[in-house]
Amino acid sequence: NAGVTQTPKFQVLKTGQSMTLQCAQDMNHNSMYWYRQDPGMGLRLIYYSASEGTTDKGEVPNGYNVSRLNKREFSLRLESAAPSQTSVYFCASSPLGQVPLGWQYFGPGTRLTVT
Amino acid sequence: TQLLEQSPQFLSIQEGENLTVYCNSSSVFSSLQWYRQEPGEGPVLLVTVVTGGEVKKLKRLTFQFGDARKDSSLHITAAQPGDTGLYLCAGDYTGTASKLTFGTGTRLQVTL
């Protein structure tokens, strides 16, 4: 049982390049999330998927797209990377509807630098 | 956008001291969670509080949910170096627990 896995762990991009961050969970959770974490900003929600087949914008969706490929996988795509997207990206999953309410299980993160 | 403020932002104390971290909002939470994050890792859930006035204890950690469900506190007794990390509160404003709003975090360092 690996929990939430993210690939890659580290990535350096040049401005304008595109890339996809991969996330997978093996806990049969319904909901999945993408956050970014910047110094002094805590975690900010980019996109989330409450259930397979649905996605919704979070607090900071501009410049990103997501795909809920199936119940296990939720990917985040940067179409044209900008230096402002330099951050640590976390994927999380949640067994929505089960206690403890709203509990989220996080992956180890992807450290992205855009030059 | 809901705002969840944590204080203090940074805290450096010596082993054996007590400390309290605060989490405040102008809006009512349906529930609130506390997470701890260590360097290079994702946050890990510590506790969830749901009922106004609720107090939960986890060994040397005491969590309290305000009566009006707009604030919460985390108290650590006799801090140890293993308590070092980033403490994050996260509130559910939706009532469905479908998404959380995270606070800015309190970075705690406990030295010998």
Image (spheres, coloured by chain):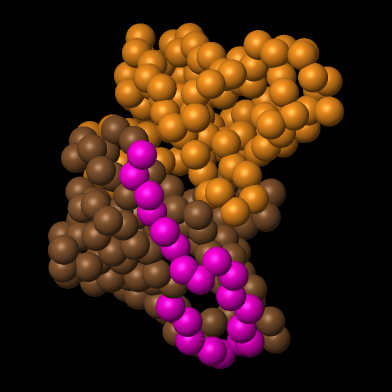
Chain colours: A orange, B brown
Point 59% across, 42% down: residue:
A37
In the image, residue A113 sits, relative to residue B101, either above or below, namely above
In the image, residue A52 sits, relative to residue B43, either above or below, namely above
Residue B85 locus on image (x, y percent): 60, 64
Is any atom of residue B58 visible in this view? Answer: no
Point 38% across, 16% down: residue:
A55
* In the image: residue A33, left or right of residue B73: right
The quadrant of the picture occupied by the N terminus of chain B is: top left
Point 53% across, 21% down: residue:
A62
Is any atom of residue A22 visible in this view? Answer: yes
Which quarter of the picture shows residue A38?
top right
Residue A109 locus on image (x, y percent): 63, 37
| Residue B15 is one of the magenta-drawn residues | yes
Q: Which residue ends up furthest to the bottom in the rendered image?
A: B16
In the image, residue B70 sits, relative to residue A109, either above or below, namely below
* In the image: residue B14, left or right of residue B51: right
Of B13 and B41, the residue lying toward us = B13
Residue B33 locus on image (x, y percent): 35, 54
Residue A100 locus on image (x, y percent): 28, 48
| Residue B14 is one of the magenta-drawn residues | yes
Point 47% across, 82% down: residue:
B19
In the image, residue B33 sits, relative to residue B81, either above or below, namely above
* In the image: residue B92, left or right of residue A27: left
Magenta range: B1-20
Of A2 and A21, the residue lying toward us = A21
The quadrant of the picture occupied by the C terminus of chain B is: bottom right
Which quarter of the picture shows residue A18?
top right
Figure disc tally? 0
Of B67 and B77, the residue lying toward us = B67
